Image (cartoon, grey):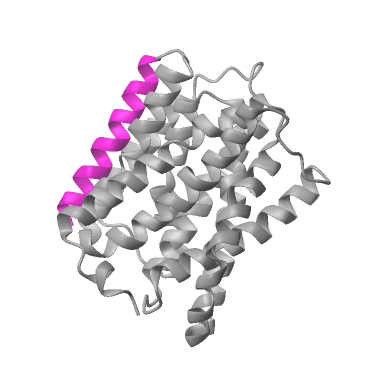
Amino acid sequence: MVPSSLRATSPVIGTFCVMAAAMCFGSIPLFSRMTFADGLTPASVTFMRYFLPALLLCFLLPPLLADRTTAFRTFLVGIAIAIGTYGYAVGIRDLDVAIAAIIFFSFPLFVSLYKLILLRLRPTQSEIITLSLITLAVALVAGPIDPDKVSLASVLTTFLGPAAYGAVLVTFSTQKQDLPALSLSAALCLGGLLGSIAIMLVFDGSLILPSSTNGWIGVIGLSIIATLAPNAFLAIGAGAAGPVRSAIGGTFELPVSLSLGWFVLMEPIELNQIAGASIILGSLIVNILKR
């Protein structure tokens, strides 16, 4: 059962919690770059992101025994999230943050694809318009990439992020949610940890640890601010905010990531990136409001 304090959360507070979660997720590029500057790889960063949250949330796993099928499905989704996290980390390392973030926000394309293949659900006319605009936005930012500076493999690997996140959304939207939200988050983090271990063994062979204070700050930021905190915010606020407010609040992640890339990491502000981000945010919000 969800504690009464969580059930009593007002829609306004719930919306602020969702926005806070989105802003926490938006900090991923900043903390990731701090770890890369200290010599860590995308595989090790993925492991570091899930190790501490899985450890801290493991005491919340027992309630999942009441529905082992849902728990196991959530655990598998966590493995998919690890794959997506690795892909996004590669994009943050090799591409401008704005490009990586806008590619990540192409996830509605994958959601519609999975629904069409698995559930035989065709997109509506308004959804087709939204998907077309998202495709245009991604083409605007990814098209001008110089192949001499960034490999095609890095660009394609970055798409693992939205592909995995789309699978997560489809899975959660088609299964019952009777289990405690924080317990489901624990299962997600545990699956993410297992998936990240496999990724780390394949690509690195062993764990690479930070060697400086900044590197450890990046690791802690990824674990606590970018993973544990937003999951807790969503568990508290998503249900109270409702699907529409939650979806709109979730779009705050993109402008936060863009702002960090442009004004903290001092990456160049390109007009095509501004146009692509504006198209994605506008199309997502309009589509959400039409529901």
**Above or below, comparing residue 58 to residue 273 in the picture:** below
**Above or below, comparing residue 84 to residue 40 in the picture:** below
> Which residue is more in the foreground, 39 or 217?
217
Residue at 32% over, 36% down? 280
> Which residue is more in the foreground, 233 or 285?
233
User: Going by the image, does 133 lie left or right of 196?
Assistant: left
Residue that sits furthest to the front in the current view: 213
First to last magenta residue range: 270-291
Is residue 182 something one can see in this rendering? yes
Q: Where's the N terminus, which quadrant?
A: bottom left
**Above or below, comparing residue 240 to residue 48 in the picture:** below
User: Going by the image, does 41 lie left or right of 78?
Assistant: right
Queried whether the magenta region covers residue 182, the answer comes back as no
Query: At which x and y percent is residue 128?
Result: 30, 48
Queried whether the magenta region covers residue 285, the answer comes back as yes
User: Going by the image, does 168 lie left or right of 82?
Assistant: left
Q: Where's the C terminus, which quadrant?
A: bottom left
Residue at 32% over, 57% down? 123
Residue 169: image quadrant is bottom left
Residue at 47% over, 64% down? 185
Query: At which x and y percent is residue 140?
Result: 41, 25
Is residue 129 something one can see in this rendering? no
Query: At which x and y percent is residue 227?
Result: 49, 49
Q: Main secondary structure of the magenta part?
A: helix
> Which residue is more in the foreground, 220 or 136?
220
